[in-house]
Image: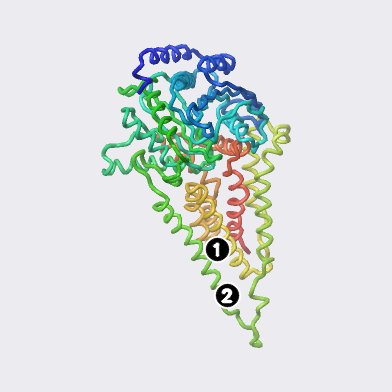
Amino acid sequence: MGLLSDPNRRQALINLLTRLNAPICGMPVDWLVKTMQARGLEVFTQSFSRTLPFPDENTERYVVKGTNVYGILRAPRAPRTEALVLSAPCTPGDNNNQAVGLLLGLAHYFRNQVYWAKDIIFLVNEHDLIGMQAWLEGYHHTNVTGMDWSPLQGRGGSIQAALSLELSSDVVTSLDIVLEGLNGQLPNLDLANLFYAFCQKIGVLCTIQGKLQRSDWDSASGYNHAVQTMMLMVMKQASGRPWGDHGLFLRYHIEAATVKGVNSFRHYKTDATTIGRLLEGMYRKLNNLLERLHQSYFFYLLPSLSHFVSIGYYMPAFGLLAVILLLRALDLWVQLSAQPSRTEDGVAGTEQSNPGVLSVLTPLVISHLTGAALYMLPVRFQEVAVEHFPVSETEAVVLTAIAVYTAGLALPHNTHRYPDMGWRVLKLVALLYLAVLLGCTAVINFSLGFILALTLVPAAAYVTPHVPKALSAFFLVALSPACTLLFSVFFFQELQEMPVSFQDGWLLYLSVIAQGMLDHYLYGSLVFPLVALLVYPCWLLFWNILFWK
């Protein structure tokens, strides 16, 4: 392709990358504006600010202010109703300087081509996901997170697809594609297929989840490698967080992915020019689209880039777990519908045997009030906790959430109105509640729904007031949402081949809780409110059944 065949352009790109190799203290807005204007783009800026609900200790920030810079290459051969986006996050230091340099080199090359039928937007966003969220809200005239941002002065057409580029070195050994987006959304599978096809054509090593595809696919070790890769995707998707800037595009039905350059000190090396050829080929293919990507799957799991598991194969596994709840509920319904025992005078004691709706109203109301407290109190009471305890704001939020979660186990949930049949009515309601909840969750985010089903279904089917209390309580707590998250943290580290000690794992667990809350307040992730307002109260119903008197 032209970017590689022209030695002058290749040398210009190398010089630009070399210049950008110096560390950057803050985003060079003025320099980016002048550089994009010199390349013939329509350049605009957007300022934004966001006050976090509590400090993010991972990035050491509380009040975030920044500026996004973007340039638009207008399509010379079309009415400019559609657009493509190429973005590169600009962070302090030299973490992603090579991606910004490659983006500017591609902008200069694309400007001299006449075959573009769609606008191409070159975006350099500050503060990674927060800057991308501000730009997307401004572009689509929405404000779903309460962020302050200035209106965009320039817009292109309707965005059809987007790629986010992350390169920390001018020499990479492989390219990794990241697909998991906000709330477990995935782009159309054709976008991943396009990336894989061009990697194969150009001869670039490509990975997913950081793992290369094995040649011995049919061997036992090959199957084990594929399962590990697929389980990594399941764990990332279940988290509900965007694993790259592309994850926020999916909310607006824009097919997007993040391409990461990996330098793992292999003998095989790929320079920035080869990556530019890959991106040029992908954008030329996307430029020829007559409609949005929709022919392939939106629900899938990837054991490798050349194989996928469609929804028709993995959804029956979830269905087999959900049917256990329905069969158990049917069994309870039959028990409750059986003929009531007769009194001494031969008249059926209906009022004494059949419990009413009030028998389950008290535990239902208290359980959901506890869930509402778990959702609202940690952030609202952080200042009070900081004043009375020697902890930071982030620690106060996390520890308050754990305290509320633990306090819910001690509340008197049950009612003594119908001591014999009341728990059966409550369990029938809880089983149907859990079946509907898991079904709806699996439709939106299969991985999250499946993990919850693996832990909650055995507990829901087993628990009754007549089982041994101590052993059953330990079993139920071990399968609770909080312990499930704890086990998932250690399991994820094992899948990444980076095992941690229990102390480090516990600190990581607390960090994951804080990050989950931040993802909800900053980007609209649904995992935290789902667990706090629905999953946890539902689990409390089964806890109440176990200790029913």
Measured as percent of width and height from the top left, residue 212 is found at: 34, 33
Measured as percent of width and height from the top left, residue 24 is found at: 53, 15
Write the residue at 53% across / 20% down: 41
Please tell me whether residue 508 is drawn above or below residue 20 in the rendered image. Answer: below
Q: Quadrant of the C terminus?
A: bottom right
Disc 2 crowd, CA 10 A, few/some/many (<14, 14-19, 20+): few
> Residue 337, labelled with which disc?
2
**Which residue is at the front of the view, 2 or 210?**
2
Please tell me in which quadrant of the rendered image residue 295 appears.
top left
Tag 1 secondary structure: loop
Q: According to the image, label 1 marks what residue?
A: 464
Please tell me in which quadrant of the rendered image residue 47 appears.
top right
Three-letter amino acid code of the residue under disc 2: Ser
Of pointers 2 and 1, the one earlier in the residue sequence: 2
Q: Is residue 311 visible?
A: yes
Please, which colouring scheme is shown?
Answer: rainbow
Residue that sits furthest to the bottom in the current view: 345
**Which residue is at the front of the view, 495 or 292?**
292
Q: CA distance from mark 2 to mark 1?
A: 19 Å
- Left or right: residue 400 versus residue 77 is right
**Which residue is at the front of the view, 288 or 147?**
288
Write the residue at 67% across / 50% down: 370
Three-letter amino acid code of the residue under disc 1: Thr
Measured as percent of width and height from the top left, residue 508 is found at: 52, 35
**Which residue is at the front of the view, 216 or 162?**
162
> Residue 5, labelled with which disc?
none
Please tell me whether residue 460 is drawn above or below residue 41 in the rendered image. Answer: below
